[in-house]
Image: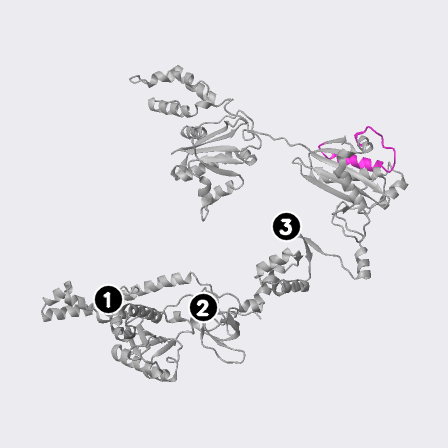
């Protein structure tokens, strides 16, 4: 912290000291030499008295009793603050009197690219700097973070973490930190003070402590082990109970496979317990038992006289030497009750045969390797005969028992597997697993769950076989009721393929509107409409009924005689469009008739869009005279043709005739263009008209470019929802039931949504398919979005 060089810096220094005056005794007296420099008109002269007072305050802030040691199991307070070029932090804690005490001060300057961080990123940097320096404090305590902004929310609520934010989030994941908004807390003022006066990067830090990161060492109590042995006529057992420093209990119960005395059982119990302790690598262990003989023999107070106990005593000494710090204590029988109970349980359950046993009992007999030079041959032979011993606590029973049980009762041992959750699962064969899946999926209480849910339910019933997840998915996928009652697939199966027309009247989309109720006064109830794909020009006529000859006459009189022979016409699969008359008519004029797939109006979207717009105009113009809609049809067509369309941003009239139509309103209230034309001569009008016709091609090219851009935007938006789904010739598929009315129920509440299966006879481009039934009858061409694969 540099010395103040002028009055402004001195005032700033004293202002910060005022916020932390409760940490400094006699602050007014310590600042007395500064008071004369603050008087008006006094020159700023930093003499020895000011320098000594400044150094005295700095020394006071870095020595006890300002900093104190943390209190175990109490939360910490972490204050962080940022400035333009520095960050600071203060670690504090409330003592027994609920007064905040400082534990650690931190501050540093920002360097390099850190100076360009946003304010919230600087706050995050201050937090990361604090947790890296105070790691050993924060791992041991829960921490309350106090700051102006919440860096935890900024880091953890980002939708995508990358770069330094991802690294910071990973560093924060191991700490228990809770954010508290900044209040009028004095500790925040000290954090701001540290941020304003950071340690310069060129300063060399001197450490007064060998390891400043380890400020608190928590000494845990040693482990405790209680053991006891039980010997009876029909068996013997050993019990061991470990007590961790956090008072967690680890009980062990062992069935001793050899008949032995009480003292031998005691030695067996301590040997088993010491073996476990050596495997756990316990640094400290206190051992307790109610047998004074065993304890005093192991401590050396008593001599071991019985030859059968000498190898056990010697082996126990070897195990005790492997533990760094161990102590043996004698306790009354009343204080060794749990270990005595564990030994008694093991001794009682030694010969229960086939009776139920829910207590996990480990079967073992431990005899240390004998020293041949100290034990006579007879004792050595005796010990070696009793050495079918295993160091494992989970040694199985006699290997002949399962064979005997199978020959006598035709029963096999239960094969169990332990799951990651600790549950014991019964292992099944492939055939048994399929039987379980079938019963759970579609049995008496089956709910026809999906594959993953079916797998979890079977696992919850404590069954296991290696391919249960794959079998569950396959079972749910091939279930016929699940296939026929599955939900509709709303995602399109193929990308969008818009119809492209390069010139006016090259392609028309045709459709029939009706029957319309009420009928018109002239008894008409249908409208036959056609829309040009390029200019959006529309033609429509009202009819009493629409037949094949009606459609052919409409195309001849309304389209060909006015606008020329089109290259192709797009229609649906309705009877008026799909017949011999239309085939001969199209063949005569060499017109391509393209039919959309059944129940797929989107394939002829332009015609459907015009139908919707025309109906809206008629609804708003007929008024109370509903039967006059056929008389209003020409006016609705005129309104549609003189309105700019969104794809081309031009009116259909201007794209066809090269100029905008003169509306009746412009005659009643002359517009500017009408007024200009009235003042022109005949030759000038002709020249103006020729100029408009010459610019018509350019206007149409611009409209085509706008149309292509519009179709491109629509295609990108549509393709985002595509989930590719295709079928090949010969595949079995299911089709949505017809008629496909998604807004109403069809065929009853419990009718299936799909029907079939059908065979794909032919696959067309753009996702259309020809299907046949099992008896060979053909179905209309169906779009792929109404199909899904069938699994027999």
In the picture, residue 296 is in which quadrant? top right
Residue displayed at 82% across by 61% down: 408
Q: Mark 2 points at which residue?
A: 744
Residue displayed at 37% across by 80% down: 576
Q: How far apart are marks 2 and 1 (CA)?
A: 49 Å
Q: Is residue 289 visible?
A: no
**Which quadrant, please, contains the C terminus?**
bottom right
Magenta highlight range: 298-325
Q: Name the residue under label 3.
A: 421
Of mark 1 and mark 3, the one earlier in the sequence is 3
Q: What element carries label 3?
A: loop
**Which quadrant, please, contains the N terminus?**
top left
Q: How far apart are marks 2 and 3 (CA)?
A: 47 Å
Q: Is mark 2 on a helix, strand or loop?
A: loop
Between 739 and 523, the one lying in front of the other is 523
Q: Badge 2 local density, few (<14 within 10 Å), some, or many (20+)?
A: few
Q: What element carries label 1?
A: helix
Q: How far apart are marks 1 and 3 (CA)?
A: 74 Å
Find out whether residue 321 is within the magenta segment: yes
């Amino acid at each position: 912290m540099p010395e103040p060089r002028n009055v402004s810096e001195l005032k700033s220094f004293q202002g910060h000291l005022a916020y932390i005056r409760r940490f400094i005794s006699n602050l007014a007296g310590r600042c007395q030499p500064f008071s004369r420099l603050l008087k008006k008109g006094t020159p700023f002269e930093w003499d020895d008295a000011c320098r000594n007072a400044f150094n005295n305050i700095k020394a006071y802030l870095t020595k006890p009793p300002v900093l104190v040691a943390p209190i175990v199991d109490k939360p910490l307070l972490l204050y962080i603050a940022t400035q333009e070029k520095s960050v600071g932090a203060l670690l504090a804690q409330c003592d027994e009197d609920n007064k905040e005490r400082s534990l650690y001060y931190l501050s540093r300057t920002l360097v390099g690219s850190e100076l360009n961080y946003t304010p919230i990123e600087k706050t995050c940097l201050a937090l990361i700097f604090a947790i890296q320096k105070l790691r050993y404090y924060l791992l041991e305590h829960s921490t309350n973070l106090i700051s102006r902004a919440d860096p935890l929310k900024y880091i953890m609520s980002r939708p995508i973490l990358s770069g330094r934010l991802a690294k910071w989030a990973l560093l924060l994941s191991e700490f228990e930190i809770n954010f508290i908004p900044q209040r009028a807390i004095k500790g925040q003022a000290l954090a701001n003070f540290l941020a304003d006066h950071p340690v310069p990067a060129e300063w060399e830090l001197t450490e007064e402590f060998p390891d400043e990161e380890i400020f608190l060492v928590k000494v845990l109590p040693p482990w405790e082990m209680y053991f006891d042995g039980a010997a009876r006529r029909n068996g013997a057992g050993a019990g061991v109970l470990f007590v961790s420093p956090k008072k967690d209990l680890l009980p062990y119960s062992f069935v001793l496979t050899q008949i032995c005395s009480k003292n031998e059982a005691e030695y067996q119990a301590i040997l088993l317990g010491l073996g476990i302790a050596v495997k756990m690598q316990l640094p400290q262990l206190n051992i307790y038992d109610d047998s004074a003989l065993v304890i005093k023999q192991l401590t050396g107070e008593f001599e071991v006289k019985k030859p059968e106990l000498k190898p056990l005593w010697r082996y126990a000494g070897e195990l005790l030497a492997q533990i760094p710090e161990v102590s043996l204590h004698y306790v009354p029988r009343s204080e060794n009750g749990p270990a005595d109970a564990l030994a008694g349980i093991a001794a009682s359950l030694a010969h229960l045969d086939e009776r139920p046993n829910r207590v996990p009992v480990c079967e073992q007999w431990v005899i240390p390797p004998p020293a041949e030079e100290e034990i006579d041959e007879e004792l050595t032979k005796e010990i070696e005969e009793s050495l079918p011993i295993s160091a494992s606590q989970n040694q199985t029973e006699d290997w002949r028992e399962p064979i005997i049980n199978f020959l006598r009762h035709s029963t096999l041992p239960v094969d169990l597997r332990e799951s990651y959750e600790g549950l014991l699962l019964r292992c099944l064969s492939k055939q048994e697993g399929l039987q379980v899946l079938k019963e759970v999926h579609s049995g008496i209480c089956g709910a026809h769950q999906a594959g993953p849910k079916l797998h979890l339910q079977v696992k919850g019933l404590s069954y296991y076989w290696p391919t249960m997840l794959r079998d569950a998915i396959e079972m749910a996928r091939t279930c016929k009721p699940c296939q026929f009652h599955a939900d509709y697939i709303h995602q399109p199966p193929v990308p969008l393929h818009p119809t492209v027309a390069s010139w006016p009247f090259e392609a028309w989309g045709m459709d029939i509107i009706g029957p319309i109720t009420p009928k018109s006064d002239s008894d008409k109830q249908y409208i036959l409409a056609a829309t040009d794909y390029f200019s959006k020009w529309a033609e429509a006529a009202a009819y009493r009924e629409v037949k094949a000859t009606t459609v052919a006459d409409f195309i001849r009189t309304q389209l060909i005689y006015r606008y020329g022979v089109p290259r192709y016409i797009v229609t649906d699969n309705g009877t008026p469009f799909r017949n011999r008359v239309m085939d001969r008519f199209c063949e005569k004029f060499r017109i391509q008739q393209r039919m959309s797939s059944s129940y797929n109006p989107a394939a002829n979207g332009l015609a459907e869009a015009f139908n919707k717009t025309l109906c809206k105009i008629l609804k708003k113009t007929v008024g109370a005279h509903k039967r006059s809609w056929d008389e209003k049809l020409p006016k609705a067509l005129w309104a549609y043709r003189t309105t700019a369309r969104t794809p081309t941003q031009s009116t259909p009239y201007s794209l066809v005739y090269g100029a905008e139509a003169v509306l009746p309103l412009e005659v009643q209230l002359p517009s500017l263009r009408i007024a200009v034309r009235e003042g022109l001569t005949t030759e000038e009008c002709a020249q103006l008209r020729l100029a408009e016709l010459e610019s018509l091609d350019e206007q149409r090219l611009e409209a085509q470019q706008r149309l292509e851009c519009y179709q491109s935007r629509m295609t990108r938006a549509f393709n985002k929802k595509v989930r590719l789904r295709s079928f090949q010739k010969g595949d079995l598929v299911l089709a949505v039931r017809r008629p496909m009315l998604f807004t109403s129920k069809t065929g009853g509440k419990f009718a299936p949504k799909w029907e079939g299966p059908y065979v794909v006879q032919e696959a067309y481009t753009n996702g259309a398919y020809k299907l046949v039934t099992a008896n060979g009858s053909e179905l209309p061409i169906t779009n792929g979005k109404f199909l899904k694969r069938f699994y027999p």
